[in-house]
Each structure stands twice: as structure tokens, then as C-alpha cells.
Image (cartoon, coloured by chain):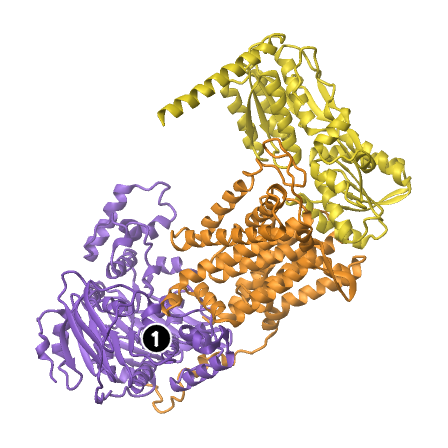
Chain colours: A orange, B purple, C yellow
């Protein structure tokens, strides 16, 4: 019997995490490592890539990531509720086709095309959500199915042709409509911002959407409950959360954002291109997964996603400026993603889990 | 008793700065059951993981039958004769495979088993193992179709097919009913007779009383007490484990208020006897009974998870028939669920956010959250429930089981309710936290009715004003918690005597 | 209901008979086995199918096959090389008389093509070298496409300029266009390639626009962009417009479509010229070459469809809005006088 009966104090004090150093080098690396890397990268390219430094190249880096960034924010919302949306790329290209079809073939004004695209995005999100929530199809499979469906669907109205002004329709006639100038403005207009004609509208869209999603996820109770669902769906349901409704909402946000990205794409290209959108999907997923590593969050988050998209953008544009061929860019994109995932799942997990 | 099978000396293990085992020494004799007691965080799990080859020790020696025992992996430990049955049953079985494959799976993994499965042989071997263990199931049946108890027995049977010399059982009865546990104890006794050393880890005094030959108490990574003389000094063991004497709980039954919830002719199953029960303001009622006695069904009916078969529930005089937890909560009926890891804890959230989840609307205006209000509430709760933590923003998984459970309770004390349901609130909770929780529930009991669902009588006696016993989906006995005859409750629980409601004292 | 269905059936039947008699009507002058329209089955086995070029190619194949009276089956492998080879075997099993292999990889198609030849099937290959003497190659001369575009660039800009170049190695037609670029650079030391870029990530125009923005930012002295594929050129044009350099940079490309025509004709468009073979014409030539083989004649080991230079100036001068206008105004674009015989019927225009 070696027990000191009186000396009990507060139980199990030595076990409390107090004795761990609060900000070790590892902690700092996990929290700020990725942002430091981002800044380092920018400095590196500023020195070694001619013309990289400066507001204009900053803006077009933003522009190059605007579409993927918006898509990635949608994926982030589905990741938050523990889901995944593989259909965003094809939703975007379908929206691009729909916008072009509405204006060029059906000769509708821009407003109608925009509304149609948004409704389509929300509807596809709704269908995805219902497949997952009501019919219990696993999220990856449901959205994969939706992706194939859309890749096929977008070809049906034009029998596989891309849509451009003056195109020949399947029945042999010529399309009479054109892209509404207002619609093209969405992809092409640039605001004066310090410099004349600096800030393109897609960049404004990206920044605004990123802020809105951030506010929604971080500061509203709806965002909080979505995170709760992602962490433990059962527990969230047992605290009275309407899990199904939030999950469907997440997919609808994802669908709507994808359609916004698709419209920006249509406005930039000035036509509707047949495309599967798989590259858009992969870039967007990469951005949101890289986002896990930003600030050591180890979870999907809007700020991280935006930073992730920016990171990929800086990397790719910088490499292009240094004349690196496209396949090295794919390789480096993959390498960054792998490193970010290691960051997230190994280091951050070590930080969080005691035993 | 003198034949010492396993000798552990000076075992040390640290995770980072956290020293979990501080030079632990222990002997485990063959042919006897050593019960290991310790509060959460005492280092029991770490000890088990070292013995079963999951972790390696930092210092110290383990010898098994005179030879040095340093397992390189869990399978190495099994080969060397140390078999462990872990607490989480589903770690032990693969639900999609049939019973035979589950029993034989370690064999399948052995090199030299051959590439193709010989089904007939497999079933025959499995049947033999099952027969030897006294498990009465069809070995061709998928494990997913079996109950918890059978799964547990299969995990143990599989462990025993290795002919171990040391068997470690980590909380084996945590999901078993008393009858099922009895089957397990019989099994353990046959092993004991064969000369197997058994290390039995449990929080349950009733198990320990039933099965232990010796008791070892652990505290802060060291052995704090060893009890081998008959009769075993159970109180001394608890005392050694906690560092203080277990207080006798003295329930003062307060004046109960007006009725809040009334169950009228409620049938949980088509052919079950209907339930009539009235819950009053400022009253705490414990519902106890075996696994499958209908406790869970009653809790689920009240929380809108599963509608009752027939009958009515009224809440404050109005009809109450919730169809979802959301509706139940809106009506002022809250439930802290059992199995907190799967049903309650939101692992990615810190303490504050785990507390605020159900009532976020209270912490927000126009949907925007006020973090200050959340934090203040969390701090109040930490204070009120003596939750041991660094700050209110600690990750939930940095807390011990007992403290996690306190957070889960705190979640439902944020808002006022009319009926509070606590389903197994003491699951995996050390005795200190158990007292804290019980005390807090009793302190706040005014203004609501409280229904506590527990399987352990001790727990019911510690917390309730009234104890209701369920059997076959209906209530068969009711006791006022004052000078209760334990044996009477036990006979009711096991359903051997058909107690009538008239037995109730008041 | 029943009556309606029957009358519809009757209508179809009469239409079919009508078509058949019409077919025999002009097929009488054709040699065997083409004198019996609908009897001869051919298959088009495709590797690439998305994009305007391939759509137009297909429509050419369809129209010419209809004109000759061939029963056309289309197999589309969507860039799956193994599947494309399997599809050749499917076509053999189907008992077709002729096969057109459209694009693909030499390695995967060589043996499949040989199996088809062994089965007594006539085969022509478009834009893929299957290394088989029995199989004529239909080619649009990619080398000439590149060459003509660069000659126009030199005509417009002289022989002293800094260039951006869009190229993705490993794509056969681009590789052949690349040869012309290398030759022109070697012959004109004043032409300096400042940057090379290019990607096939879809949407291709969008991905290349992003890259071209970087290239233009990093190399502000570039005055000429050689983008020998119209999707590349579209991307570069978007980047040039966004960088506000429309009047400083000239783009020369290959291939053409209605969308390209409108892009070239935009006010101040940087896209100065493109060189193209009409993909529909290439499709027609493919079928004609196969038809010639089916009659037992030899169209020659190589059937080259000559390209046409299309300048921004020409488009504006003739107010050309789409491919139809272009065909109408440029006879050499509307019809290539290769793989022709006296009896060969041409699609109606």
C-alpha cells in the first residue's frame, strides 16, 4: 500500500496538456508554414521570373485562379458537411454551354441566361443532395454519376457542337443570337483600381464569394452546424440539427457556385465549349485540400481554400513565366498537394491528438 | 498462485512530455484473475497496449514464463501467447464476414495457410472452437446479424483459439447485460482452470466482486495498491485507485413538484405490457434493466427517434408526439445520449463549441454567432461541473472520458428544459467524474423532470429519487430510493420474480 | 391510335422505297460493288471526336458516304487507344467492307489495321500512320499548314521579330507543324523564340489564355504569336485582349471554324491569319479514297488535302461570317480536287 490518501488535489493534473510547450517550432511550422511558403514563392518568382512582380501580374494571377477558386469554395462547403462533389467541373461546363445556348440559339437576353444557369446549378445541387441524403447513394458515387450525366447532357442540344455566334445548328440552320454584351462584360470588364483597367470582374467575384463563404462558415450558426455534421453526423442529428437539410444546402451552394464559375468561363471565352471540366474539378479539389493545411486548420475552410487556389495560381503562372513546360506544372501541382496533405494529416493530427 | 507467469518491472512510457507510465511493476500469476482498477487516465490502456504489442515501452522489462517478452507487433504478441480483447467490440469482429471466418481470421492471415479457402474445413474448425467455448450460434451466419454479446464472445473465442498463456480483457462487460456477463464469467473460469493468467480491466465493482482473485489498483502511471488476501478489500482498492475514500451517497429525496410528463398506456412493442408512468418536477428517476429490456426504446420514444407502438405521452398537460430530435428539443425535452464517442462528441470542436451545439440560436443574432457569449457560457459550465482542462478552447479529445462526459452534460444544461433524458451518463466515466455529474444533475433538478437510463444498480442508487425497473419493454417494478433492498431490485431486473407496481413504497 | 401508327409506318416504308429508287437512280453509273447502294457497309473508327474540327470532319464523312450510297457506322473511342483497336475488331466482326481509321496511335492501331486488311477489308487511315502499304494515308498537310501561316507572318512583319510559340509535343499534327516552325527559325536568325507554352487542359482556350497572360507579362517585347491550333490561338487572343496588347501583337494560327472567323474579324483583332484545310473536305476525301479502293482501284499511298491561307483582310473584304460564306467565297476551300474519279458523286452543296 503506497497510497497517499490525503494528497489528491485536482485529479490527474499531470495528464493535462499544460506541460506541452504551447508554441513549439512544430506548432509554428504547422500554423504558418504554408503561408510562409506562399510568400517565399512570391519572392522567389519576383526575383527570378521577369515581370512577375507588380500589380498587373498579381491581378492576372487572381484572374487565372478565379474560376478554380470559386469552384473550390463550393467543394469546400460539401467537404465541410463530410461530403464531396465531383460534379462541379461538369456543372461549370454545363453552365457555360447553357449560357451560350440561351443567348446564341434561343436569343435570350443576358439576365435570362444568368438566371437559367443559377437555377440549373441549384437544381443539380438539389438532385445531388437528394441522391445522397434520401437515396443513400455514397457522395462520391452520386456526384460521379452526375458528372457523367452532365458531360453527356451538355452535348445533346447541339449534337456535340461547341456553341459560338453564327454556328450551324444540327438541323442545318444558322444560330441567330449573339452573346449579350452585358454578359461578356462579366468576364472581360476591368475596373480601375489604382491603375487604369486593373481589376477584372471575375476577380471581384472570387473575392466577394470567398468573403461570403467565409462569413457563412465561420460566423453563422448554420456554418457551425455544417462543421458539426462533418465531424459527427449522428451527434449533430441528436442535438436536433436537421442534417438532411444542411447537407442538401451544401450541395446546392456547390452547384450554384459551379454555375457562377461556368458563366464567368463562358463570358471570358465568348462561346460555349464542350468540355468535361475534369481539369477544373481537379484544380478545385487540389485548392480546397491544400486549404486544409493553411493555418494548421486540418479541416476544410474558406480562407485556406482561397489561399490554396492562390498558391496554385502563383506557382503555375510563375513557372510559365520561367518557360517551364506544362507537364512539369502538373507534376509540381501534384507534389504541392501531396505535401499539403502530409502537413494536414500527419503533423496537424499529431498536434491535436494526445493519445 | 505461486507460479508467476508474467513479470513486469520498471515499465516506463511517455507520449511527448506526457509521462504515462512511471516505472510500473506488476506480477501476474498463472491460473488466477487479476483485476486492474484505475481512474481514466491512470495508464491502464497504455499498459494494455504495451503488453499487446501496439506500443513499445521506453524502459523496463516484461518477461513471460521466464523469457523476455518484447512484442514487435500485435500479431507477434499473439504468437508469443498474449491475447487481448479490446473494449470496442467492433475492433474485434468484422461484421460483413460470417462467424466462421471471424473465428478463423487470424489463422487465415498466418503464412502457410494456403491460398484457397476450404469452406467445409473452415466451418468444421470454427464449429469446434465455438463448441469448446460454449457459443451457440450458426457459424455460417454473418456477424452483422448477431447481438453485441455474441460478438463479444466471438472476439474472446477467437482470442482463445490461440491457446494464450495471458489473456487481457479490457472492459469486456461494458456492453453486456448481466445474464450475458455471466456467460462470460463462466468462460473466464474455465480458462482460469486451464492455468491461463487473466488480466481483467473494469470499472464495474460487481464484475470485480464476481471474478477477481486479486486486485491491482493503478494511479498516475504507477501501481498504487495490490490486494490478494481473501476476503479482498474492495474499498481499499477503490481508495487506492482514487486516492480517497468512496463516499457513501446519501440521497435526500426532495419534495416533488407537479407532474410534467405522463405516459399513458404506452406500448413500446406490439405485445409488450403498456407503461403508465408519471414524472414530476424536481424528480430524478432512474430507469434500469438488462440490455434489451426496452430502456433505449423508451428513451428514443421520448426524444422523437422512434415512435412508440401505441399509447400517449403528455407534456405539461398537452399531447406530445415528437417525430424528430429537433421537435423534441423545441418542446423542451433534451437527451444526452449513450455511447458519447459515436453519438455525442464532435471531435473537431473544442469544449466551447461542443457545449453550444444544440442551442446555437441562443448564441446568435440573425444567425451570426457571438463568440463572447459562447465562451462565457462554456467557462461557467467548466466551473460548475469542475471540468479538468487548460481552457475552454481545448480540443474535446484532449479530455479524459469523465471530463468529456461532463461536457456532454453541460451541453444540455445550457437551456432550461422540462424533461432531461440521460442515457448511460456514467459510461466510461471514472468515479470522481461520476460523483460530479450526479451531484450537478441533482442540484439542477428543479424546474424539470429527469430520467436517467442506467444498467448498473450502483449508478441508479447514487443518483435517483425513484428507481424504475424495466423488463421485456415494460415496467415491472418501482422503488423509492430509500433503504432499498438490493436483492429485491436484482430479482426484478433479472425478471425472475414478477414484481407488481403495488410494491412501490410511497 | 392503331390507324395512326399504321399510316406512319406506311409513310416510312414509302420514304424508304423512294430513297432506295433514288439511290439506284444515280448509282447506275458507279462501278461494282457501289452500284447497289446500301449494300456496302463502311465504318469510321474515331480516336478524337470533341471539338469543332472533328464535328466538321464527321459531317463531311457522313455527306460523302450518303452521296456514294454507303452504309456508315461510327465507332467513337474518345481517346481510348485500346478501345479504338477493339472497335476495329468489332467492325471486322460486323462484316463491314471498308474502314476509315481517324487518328489514333501507331502502336495500338498497327496490328488492328493489319487484322482488318487480312480480313479482306479495305482500310484508309486519316492522320495516323499505321505503317501498312495496303492502307493509304489521308493527310491534311500539317507541315504546309504551319509553313503557309509562317510565310504570311514574315510577309506581314518582316524577318526580325520576337515570338511566342504555343506547342504541346507528342501530338502528331502539332509535331508536324513544329517542323515548319523549326525550319523558319533556322532560315531567319532574326526571328527569336522568346517563350514556349501550351497545354491541352480543357477548356483548352481558357487554360492557354492563363499561360499566355504570364508569357506576355514576362516578355513584353513579343510581337508575334505562332499558335498553330485554333484553340491555342483563341486562348492567346483572350490573353492579348486582356493585356490590352491587341494592336501590338499579331497571332498566326492553323485551322478555322465559324467561331474563329468571328474572333478574327473583331475590331482590332490580333488574330491576323490562319491556314486551314476544310475538315469537312478532309472527311469527304477520306470516304472518296475508300470508295475508290472498294472498286478495286488505288487512290495512291498518300492522299494529301491541300490547305488554304485565310487572312483577316480577306475575311473583312468579303464580309465572311461563317464557314458557309467561306466555302462560297473560296472554292479551293470548299472542295479539294483529290481522290476524284469520273463516276464519283459529290455531296450536294
Q: Position of residue B469 (x, y in %)?
A: 17, 74
Q: Quadrant of residue B478?
A: bottom left
Disc 1: CA contacts within 10 A as few (<14), some (14-19) or many (>=20)? some
* Residue at the farthest bottom position: A6
Could you tell me which quadrant the N terminus of chain C lies in? Answer: top left
Q: Position of residue B488 (x, y in %)?
A: 11, 77
Q: Image height check: is B451 above or below C66?
A: below
> In this view of the protein, which residue sits in the foreground, C184 or B304?
B304
Q: Quadrant of residue C321?
A: top right
| SS type, badge 1 | strand
Could you tell me which quadrant the C terminus of chain C lies in? Answer: top right
Q: Is residue B213 visible?
A: no
B32 sits to left or right of B402: left
Residue at image position (25%, 63%) is: B307
Q: Quadrant of residue C332?
A: top right
A261 sits to left or right of B412: right
C229 sits to left or right of B476: right
Q: Position of residue C34 (x, y in %)?
A: 59, 11
Q: Position of residue B211 (x, y in %)?
A: 21, 72
Q: Image height check: is C23 above or below B230?
A: above
Q: How many marks?
A: 1
Residue at image position (60%, 67%) is: A211
> In this view of the protein, which residue sits in the foreground, C13 or C141?
C13
> In this view of the protein, which residue sits in the foreground, C195 or C282?
C282
Q: Image height check: is B483 above or below A111?
A: below
Residue at image position (33%, 69%) is: B327
B301 sits to left or right of B410: left
Label 1 belongs to which residue?
A: B26
Q: Disc 1 is attached to a residue of which chain?
A: B
Q: Is residue B86 visible?
A: yes
Amino acid at each position: 500500500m503506497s497510497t497517499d490518501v490525503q494528497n489528491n488535489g485536482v485529479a490527474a493534473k499531470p495528464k493535462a496538456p499544460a506541460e506541452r510547450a504551447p508554441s513549439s517550432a512544430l506548432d509554428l511550422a504547422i500554423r504558418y508554414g504554408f503561408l510562409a511558403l506562399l510568400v517565399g514563392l512570391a519572392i522567389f518568382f519576383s526575383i527570378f521570373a521577369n515581370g512577375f512582380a507588380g500589380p498587373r501580374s498579381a491581378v492576372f494571377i487572381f484572374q487565372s485562379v478565379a474560376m478554380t477558386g470559386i469552384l473550390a469554395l463550393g467543394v469546400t462547403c460539401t467537404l465541410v458537411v463530410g461530403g464531396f462533389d465531383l460534379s462541379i467541373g461538369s456543372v461549370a461546363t454545363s453552365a457555360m454551354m447553357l449560357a451560350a445556348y440561351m443567348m446564341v440559339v434561343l436569343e435570350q437576353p443576358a439576365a435570362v441566361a444568368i438566371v437559367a444557369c443559377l437555377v440549373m446549378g441549384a437544381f443539380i445541387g438539389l438532385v445531388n443532395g437528394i441522391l445522397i441524403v434520401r437515396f443513400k447513394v455514397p457522395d462520391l458515387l452520386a456526384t460521379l454519376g452526375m458528372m457523367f450525366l452532365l458531360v453527356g447532357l451538355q452535348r445533346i442540344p447541339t449534337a456535340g457542337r461547341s456553341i459560338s455566334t453564327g454556328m450551324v445548328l444540327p438541323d442545318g440552320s444558322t444560330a441567330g443570337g449573339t452573346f449579350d454584351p452585358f454578359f461578356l462584360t462579366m468576364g472581360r470588364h476591368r475596373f480601375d483600381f489604382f491603375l487604369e483597367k486593373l481589376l477584372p470582374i471575375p476577380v471581384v467575384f472570387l473575392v466577394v464569394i470567398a468573403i461570403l463563404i467565409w462569413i457563412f462558415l465561420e460566423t453563422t450558426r448554420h456554418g457551425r452546424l455544417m462543421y458539426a455534421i462533418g465531424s459527427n453526423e449522428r451527434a449533430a442529428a441528436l442535438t436536433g440539427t436537421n442534417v438532411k437539410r444542411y447537407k442538401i444546402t451544401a450541395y446546392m451552394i456547390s452547384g450554384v457556385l459551379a454555375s457562377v464559375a461556368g458563366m464567368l468561363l463562358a463570358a471570358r471565352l465568348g462561346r460555349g465549349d464542350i468540355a468535361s471540366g475534369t481539369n477544373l474539378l481537379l484544380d478545385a479539389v487540389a485548392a480546397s485540400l491544400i486549404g486544409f493545411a493553411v493555418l494548421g486548420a486540418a479541416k476544410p475552410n474558406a480562407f485556406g481554400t482561397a489561399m490554396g487556389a492562390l498558391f496554385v495560381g502563383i506557382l503555375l503562372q510563375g513557372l510559365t513565366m520561367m518557360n517551364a513546360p506544362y507537364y512539369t506544372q502538373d507534376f509540381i501541382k501534384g507534389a504541392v498537394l501531396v505535401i499539403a496533405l502530409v502537413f494536414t494529416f500527419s503533423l496537424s493530427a499529431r498536434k491535436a491528438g494526445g493519445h | 498462485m505461486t507460479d508467476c507467469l508474467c513479470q513486469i518491472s520498471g515499465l516506463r512510457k511517455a507520449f511527448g512530455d506526457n509521462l504515462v507510465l512511471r516505472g510500473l511493476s506488476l506480477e501476474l500469476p498463472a491460473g488466477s484473475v487479476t483485476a486492474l482498477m484505475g481512474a481514466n487516465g491512470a495508464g491502464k490502456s497504455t499498459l494494455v497496449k504495451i503488453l499487446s504489442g501496439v506500443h513499445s515501452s521506453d524502459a523496463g522489462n516484461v518477461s513471460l514464463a521466464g523469457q523476455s517478452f518484447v512484442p514487435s507487433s500485435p500479431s507477434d504478441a499473439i504468437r508469443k501467447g498474449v491475447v487481448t480483447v479490446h473494449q470496442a467490440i467492433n475492433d474485434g469482429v468484422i461484421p460483413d464476414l460470417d462467424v466462421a471466418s471471424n473465428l478463423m481470421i487470424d489463422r487465415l492471415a498466418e503464412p502457410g495457410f494456403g491460398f484457397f479457402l476450404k469452406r467445409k474445413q473452415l466451418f468444421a474448425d470454427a464449429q469446434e472452437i465455438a463448441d469448446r467455448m460454449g457459443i451457440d450460434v450458426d457459424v455460417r451466419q454473418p456477424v452483422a446479424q448477431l447481438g453485441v454479446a455474441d460478438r463479444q464472445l466471438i472476439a474472446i473465442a477467437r482470442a482463445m483459439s490461440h491457446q494464450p498463456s495471458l489473456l487481457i480483457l479490457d472492459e469486456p462487460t461494458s456492453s453486456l447485460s448481466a445474464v450475458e456477463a455471466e456467460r462470460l464469467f463462466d468462460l473466464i473460469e474455465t480458462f482460469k482452470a486451464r492455468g491461463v493468467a487473466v488480466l481483467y480491466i473494469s470499472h464495474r465493482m460487481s464484475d470485480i466482486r464476481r471474478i477477481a482473485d486479486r486486485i491491482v489498483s493503478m494511479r498516475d502511471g504507477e501501481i498504487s495498491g495490490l490486494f490478494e488476501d481473501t476476503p479482498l478489500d474492495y474499498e481499499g482498492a477503490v481508495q487506492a485507485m482514487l486516492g480517497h475514500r468512496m463516499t457513501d451517497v446519501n440521497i435526500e429525496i426532495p419534495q416533488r413538484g407537479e407532474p410534467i410528463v405522463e405516459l399513458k398506456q404506452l406500448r413500446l412493442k406490439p405485445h409488450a405490457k403498456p407503461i403508465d408512468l408519471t414524472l414530476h418536477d424536481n424528480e430524478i428517476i432512474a430507469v434500469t434493466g438488462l440490455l434489451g429490456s426496452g430502456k433505449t426504446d423508451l428513451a428514443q420514444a421520448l426524444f422523437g427517434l422512434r415512435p412508440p407502438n401505441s399509447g400517449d405521452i403528455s407534456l405539461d398537460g398537452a399531447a406530445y408526439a415528437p417525430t424528430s430530435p429537433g421537435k423534441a428539443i423545441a418542446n423542451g425535452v433534451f437527451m444526452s445520449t449513450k455511447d458519447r464517442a459515436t453519438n455525442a462528441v464532435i471531435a473537431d470542436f473544442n469544449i466551447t463549441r461542443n457545449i453550444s451545439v444544440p442551442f446555437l440560436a441562443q448564441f446568435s443574432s440573425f444567425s451570426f454567432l457571438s463568440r463572447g457569449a459562447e465562451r462565457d457560457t462554456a467557462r461557467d459550465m467548466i466551473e460548475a461541473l469542475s471540468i479538468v482542462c487548460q481552457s475552454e478552447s481545448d480540443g474535446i479529445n484532449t479530455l479524459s472520458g469523465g471530463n468529456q462526459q461532463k461536457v456532454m452534460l453541460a451541453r444540455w444544461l445550457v437551456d432550461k428544459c422540462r424533461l432531461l433524458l440521460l442515457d448511460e451518463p456514467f459510461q466510461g466515466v471514472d468515479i470522481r467524474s461520476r460523483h460530479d455529474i450526479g451531484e450537478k444533475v441533482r442540484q439542477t433538478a428543479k424546474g424539470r423532470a429527469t430520467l436517467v437510463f442506467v444498467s448498473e444498480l450502483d449508478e441508479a442508487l447514487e443518483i435517483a429519487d425513484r428507481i424504475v425497473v424495466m423488463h421485456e419493454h415494460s415496467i415491472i417494478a418501482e422503488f423509492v430510493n430509500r433503504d432499498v433492498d438490493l436483492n429485491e431490485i436484482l430479482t426484478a431486473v433479472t425478471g425472475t420474480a414478477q414484481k407488481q407496481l403495488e410494491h412501490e413504497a410511497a | 391510335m392503331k390507324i395512326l401508327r399504321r399510316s406512319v409506318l406506311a409513310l416510312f416504308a414509302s420514304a424508304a422505297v423512294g430513297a432506295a429508287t433514288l439511290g439506284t437512280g444515280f448509282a447506275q453509273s458507279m462501278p461494282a460493288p457501289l452500284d447497289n447502294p446500301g449494300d456496302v457497309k463502311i465504318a469510321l473508327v474515331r480516336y478524337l471526336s470533341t471539338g469543332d474540327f472533328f464535328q466538321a470532319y464527321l459531317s463531311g464523312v457522313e455527306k460523302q458516304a450518303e452521296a456514294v450510297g454507303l452504309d456508315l457506322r461510327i465507332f467513337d473511342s474518345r481517346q481510348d487507344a485500346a478501345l479504338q483497336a477493339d472497335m476495329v475488331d468489332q467492325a471486322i466482326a460486323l462484316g463491314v467492307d471498308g474502314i476509315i481509321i481517324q487518328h489514333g496511335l501507331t502502336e495500338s492501331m498497327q496490328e488492328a489495321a493489319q487484322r482488318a486488311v487480312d480480313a479482306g477489308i479495305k482500310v484508309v487511315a486519316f492522320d495516323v500512320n499505321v505503317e501498312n502499304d495496303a492502307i493509304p494515308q489521308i493527310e491534311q498537310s500539317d507541315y504546309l499548314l504551319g509553313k503557309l501561316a509562317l510565310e504570311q507572318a514574315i510577309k506581314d512583319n518582316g524577318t526580325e521579330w520576337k515570338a511566342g510559340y504555343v506547342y504541346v509535343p507528342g501530338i502528331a499534327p502539332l509535331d508536324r507543324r513544329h517542323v515548319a516552325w523549326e525550319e523558319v527559325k533556322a532560315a531567319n536568325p532574326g526571328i527569336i523564340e522568346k517563350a514556349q507554352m501550351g497545354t491541352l487542359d480543357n477548356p483548352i482556350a481558357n487554360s492557354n489564355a492563363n499561360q499566355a497572360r504570364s508569357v506576355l507579362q514576362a516578355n513584353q517585347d513579343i510581337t508575334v504569336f505562332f499558335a498553330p491550333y485554333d484553340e491555342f490561338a483563341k486562348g492567346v487572343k483572350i490573353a492579348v485582349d486582356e493585356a490590352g496588347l491587341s494592336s501590338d501583337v499579331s497571332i498566326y494560327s492553323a485551322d478555322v471554324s465559324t467561331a474563329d472567323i468571328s474572333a478574327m474579324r473583331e475590331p482590332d483583332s490580333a488574330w491576323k491569319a490562319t491556314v486551314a484545310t476544310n475538315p469537312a473536305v478532309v472527311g469527304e476525301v477520306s470516304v472518296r479514297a475508300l470508295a475508290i479502293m472498294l472498286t478495286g482501284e488505288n487512290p495512291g499511298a498518300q492522299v494529301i488535302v491541300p490547305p488554304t491561307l485565310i487572312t483577316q483582310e480577306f475575311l473583312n473584304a468579303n464580309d465572311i461570317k461563317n464557314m458557309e460564306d467561306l466555302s462560297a467565297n473560296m472554292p479551293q476551300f470548299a472542295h479539294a480536287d483529290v481522290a476524284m474519279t469520273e463516276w464519283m458523286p459529290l455531296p450536294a452543296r
